[in-house]
Amino acid sequence: MIIKIADLVINCNILFIDDFKSINKYEVLESPSYYINSFIKEYDLPLLNNPILETDYYDMYLVDGKKVQYQRTLDGNYLGVIEYDGNIVNIYNIPNCNFYREYTLTQYAISYLVTKYSNSIFFHSSSIEYKGKGICFSAKSGTGKSTHRSLWCKYSNALPINDDKNIITLKDDKLYISPNPWSGKHMIDNNKEVTLDSIVFLYQNKTNVVERIRPFMAMKLLLGQIELPNEENKELWDKITDKMLSLPIYHYGCNMEEEAFTTIKERIEEDLCL
């Protein structure tokens, strides 16, 4: 299947494409320049020492000039290997692979292509379009981003854009939320691009308290929810984060009742003149 994400046309040749139902919305009839190939095949790593990067979930190696990611679960079980070769990403799955395991690996593949080849960064957040404006709700996992997003969809005509892995793209000196079918465990997304106009950082609170915050505090919260820059995209990363910090940004302690939606909605409408 050929899909388009963040203006990249990608030949997405994955095993469990029929189970990845939301990806159908992104299909296009264009010639691809980028490729994600997924196989059930053991990858013969020539060495398993001296990684160039170690994290909780994977180790990265440099093999014959290509970056090779040895992926595992948090409890240490081997999940598969991802090979990055320019505009091509090859995924080698274990024999008992299923959709959810492949979905995990392909998230790394799409993140690599989008970050490397488009004017974009990823922002861990749940986003909506409301009255033509794009709003991102961000917080640590388990805080209630999806639940809060669902309040907007329940009590207004808000449209969910992406429930977890938002692509923030810089185009024509403006920020956009680019659609993306990789959208977290709930897999809620829509193939619609919208400007990014406001950011809300959530935390749990018994009463609803909203505060518009200055860029310094917003940056500290933002750093915990976006991918950090590398040598290749540092300049772009700086431009995007600077523009994000110029938006109306709120720190919002809230419960998950209807009033939590009403309180922040009224404040955003006032500030955005909606």
Image (cartoon, rainbow, N blue to C red):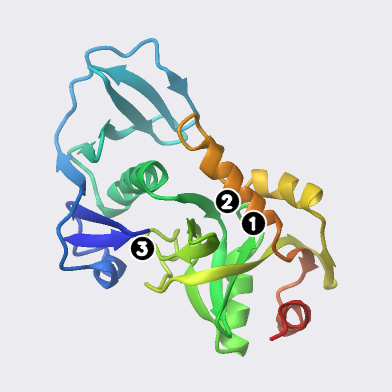
- Please report contact status of discs 2 and 1: CB closer than 8 Å, yes or no: yes
Q: Vertically, is 125 above or below 241?
A: below
Q: Picture coordinates of residue 93 (x, y %)? A: 22, 38
Residue of label 1: 244
Q: Quarter of the image for the C terminus: give it.
A: bottom right
Which residue occupies 23% across, 44% down?
97
Kind of residue at disc 2: Ile
Residue 227 in sight here: no
Residue of label 3: 181
Kind of residue at disc 3: Pro
Dot 3 falls on a residue whose secondary structure is loop
Query: Foreground mark, 3 or 1?
Result: 1
Q: Picture coordinates of residue 77 (x, y %)? A: 37, 31
Which residue occupies 42% across, 44% down?
115
The circle on residue 240 is 2
Kind of residue at disc 1: Met
